[in-house]
Image (spheres, coloured by chain):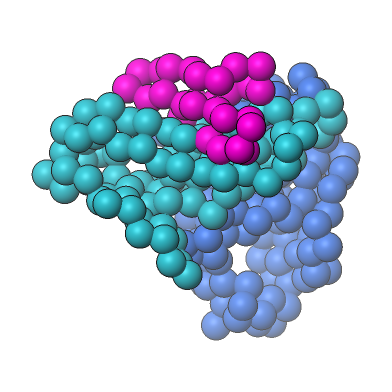
Amino acid sequence: GESVGLHLPTLSVQEGDNSIINCAYSNSASDYFIWYKQESGKGPQFIIDIRSNMDKRQGQRVTVLLNKTVKHLSLQIAATQPGDSAVYFCAENLSGGSYIPTFGRGTSLIVHP
Amino acid sequence: DTEVTQTPKHLVMGMTNKKSLKCEQHMGHRAMYWYKQKAKKPPELMFVYSYEKLSINESVPSRFSPECPNSSLLNLHLHALQPEDSALYLCASSQAGGGGNQPQHFGDGTRLSIL
């Protein structure tokens, strides 16, 4: 399950399960959203993005859902694998100017074999 | 392997030292960034260069001095750092323009420890 506290929220799942990582964004004017994966000892890696004119976008084993009404973004990972264990950050951006994304606080995904 | 290369991977320095972090990309990106990341926290933006010109300085102390010698290179010069400056320093790049709808590409960072 998911636990949220003063530190990094953590989601623990079993290998093969589907994972859902949630993110609440702050700026209702944001119109571009990105999910990054950061493995231990590495920099953030782009996973998938979505623009505000869409509410769903699919990649390989990943799906991003955007609900602009409640300013909520989610990342779904199908058939989660141990290699998916990492910290996942959402980022929001306001287009029309410089690309200065605002990162969410991150969620640690732990996949148990 | 990441397309953004950062050196060194690890750096230990005293508070009186001067050192530099380096970042290189060959993707033709014209926007480059420095971030600071503490453990279990999201990256915090420090500087943004757009077309080799400093466009954003997020009120970073002057002991951090960025430099963009050309469109492929980004440096961060360090002098008289404090122990609280110990962190992972990340470089990123993205296509400039496009209305900001482009993802950033990150390097794997330099792990900096201040003694």
Choose between B55 and A81: the one closer to the eye: A81
Side of A67 where B15 appears, left or right:
right
Q: In the figure, B40 relative to A42: above or below?
A: below
Image quadrant in which the N terminus of chain B is located: top left
- In the figure, what tint was chain A given? cyan
* Residue sticking out furthest to the front: A69
Which range is magenta?
Answer: A47-73
Residue A109 position, x and y percent, is 33, 48
Image quadrant in which the C terminus of chain B is located: bottom right
- Report the number of discs: 0
User: Who's the residue at 43% across and 33% down the image?
Assistant: A75
- In the figure, what tint was chain B given? blue
Residue A88 position, x and y percent, is 44, 44
Side of B76 where A72 appears, left or right:
left
Side of B76 where B67 appears, left or right:
right
Residue A76 position, x and y percent, is 37, 31
Residue B106 position, x and y percent, is 56, 39
